[in-house]
Image: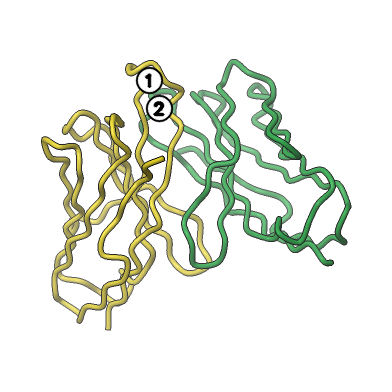
Amino acid sequence: KQEVTQIPAALSVPEGENLVLNCSFTDSAIYNLQWFRQDPGKGLTSLLLIQSSQREQTSGRLNASLDKSSGRSTLYIAASQPGDSATYLCAVSSNTGNQFYFGTGTSLTVIP
Amino acid sequence: AAGVIQSPRHLIKEKRETATLKCYPIPRHDTVYWYQQGPGQDPQFLISFYEKMQSDKGSIPDRFSAQQFSDYHSELNMSSLELGDSALYFCASSLSLTGGSYNEQFFGPGTRLTVL
């Protein structure tokens, strides 16, 4: 079974810092990887999706990379803001695309 | 743009009762997924449907069942509820790989189920 791990579990940074969140997975036979943001008690908001054939995707201050062979993805957040405070989850899909496995999440706090 | 709709948003039930959660996917999306998220935990995949047929099954208890209807909405039926079933239940939808997309999931706001 696919195991997805995220490091660190929690991160606190001052406003304006650049930061990197890590996601690792045990089975490289994936179709895609998706990064989500979740605010407390709320639903999941899709941030970026990387297909297995891609190396990275960018959206605004966010950049996600994927190294499928080593089972790793990173989410880079530039110039962090207090509004970025949330839990960030990565999810990988099986190679059939019909089942997704979530990581344990990184709780980010950006201090004004 | 239309999003995934879930109802009800909150539900309180007693032990051993039944509950039905509903999910209305984004128009044209043909795949629906159900997840359970316990307090402080990551979402756990329960089950998915593609074109009204079950496509994948995760950690869904035997007491739960689900189906996707002809209008693509889905229902998760939960019987003999237990205290441990208290959680956020999310539905997500996507346009399948065969539909020419990258299968990006879009999540609904969730249904918070509390079992007393």
| Chain letter for the yellow colouring in the rendering | B
Q: Is residue B77 left or right of residue B85?
A: left
Report whether B59 appears left or right of B81. Answer: right
Q: Which residue is mark 2?
A: A97
Residue B89 falls in image quadrant: bottom left
Secondary structure, mark 2, is loop
Res. B81 image quadrant: bottom left
Q: Which residue appears at 78% of the width and 56% of the height?
A: A81
The residue positioned 14% from the left and 65% from the top of the image is B79
Instruction: Please state which of the two labelled residues, at mark 2 or mark 1, is closer to the viewer.
Output: 1
Residue B115 drawn at (x, y percent): 28, 78
Q: Is residue B55 above or below residue B64?
A: above
- Host chain of mark 1: B
Q: Mark 1, residues whose alpha carbon is within 10 Å: few (<14), some, or many (≥20)? A: some
Q: Which residue is mark 1?
A: B97
Residue at the left extreme of this rendering = B70
Identify whether B106 is placed above or below B61.
above
In the picture, the disc for residue A105 is none
In depth, the one of B23 and A53 nearer the eye is B23
The C terminus of chain A, quarter of image: bottom right
Q: Residue A76: x, y in percent?
A: 77, 40
The amino acid at mark 1 is: Leu
Q: Position of residue A69 (x, y in %)?
A: 65, 21
| Chain represented in green | A
At x 22%, y 55%, the residue is B22
Indicate the amino acid at tag 2. Gly
Is the residue B76 above or below the residue B2 in the image? below
